[in-house]
Image (spheres, rainbow, N blue to C red):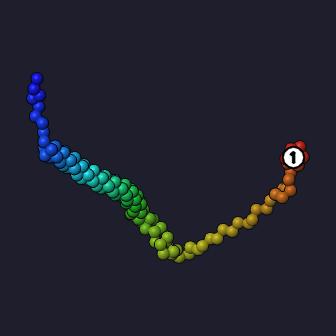
Amino acid sequence: MQDYRRRRGNKQDVLRAGLGLGGVLLLAFLAFFAVRGALGMYSKFASASQADASAQVELEDLRRQLSQVGAAATALSSERGVEAGVRERYGVARPGEGQIDIIRREATTTGSTPGEPGLFTKIFRALFVW
């Protein structure tokens, strides 16, 4: 029987190997840029996530300041609040008002001094010496 396969020449083998190598290099080139793009997107996502977290913290801080300013504005809306604000800010008083200083005497302690151990402590130390 005859062999119906044609024999390829050296030139065709080299061409086929070159095309295979070119295809592998093309796939490697495409894979490199795909991975590079994915890493770039990941770094942008991470920085955006950090920026979002810091913006949330700043938003909470601003909301807290808004509530404090609102409370201060509410307190200053009455005549008594205005008077308290002026007294606190400028340290003024009405005519006839004075300052009261409260001085407390030091407390005296009666009992054993901290350096002298009590009876139970002495017994415990005598029984359990280690």
Residue extending farthest to the front is: 1
Near-viewer residue (70 or 85): 70
Q: Position of residue 1 (x, y in %)?
A: 11, 23
How many numbered marks does the figure carry?
A: 1
Location of mark 1 (residue): 129
Identify which residue is drawn at 47% across, 72% down.
89
With 66 as the anchor, is 8 left or right in this view?
left
Residue 34 is at least partly visible in this image = no
Near-viewer residue (23 or 97): 23
| Helix, strand or loop for disc 1 | loop
Identify which residue is drawn at 84% across, 56% down.
111
Label 1 Cα neighbours within 10 Å, binned few <14 / some 14-19 / many ≥20? few
Identify which residue is drawn at 11% across, 28% down.
3
Q: Position of residue 73 (x, y in %)?
A: 39, 63
Quarter of the image holding residue 112?
A: bottom right
With 1 as the anchor, is 107 left or right in this view?
right
Near-viewer residue (88 or 95): 88
Residue extending farthest to the top is: 1
Q: Is residue 101 above or below residue 114?
A: below
Q: Position of residue 83 (x, y in %)?
A: 46, 69
Q: Position of residue 110 (x, y in %)?
A: 83, 58
Residue 39 is at least partly visible in this image = yes
Q: Amino acid at mark 1?
A: Val
Near-viewer residue (96 or 113): 113
With 45 as the anchor, is 17 left or right in this view?
left
Identify which residue is drawn at 49% across, 70% down.
88
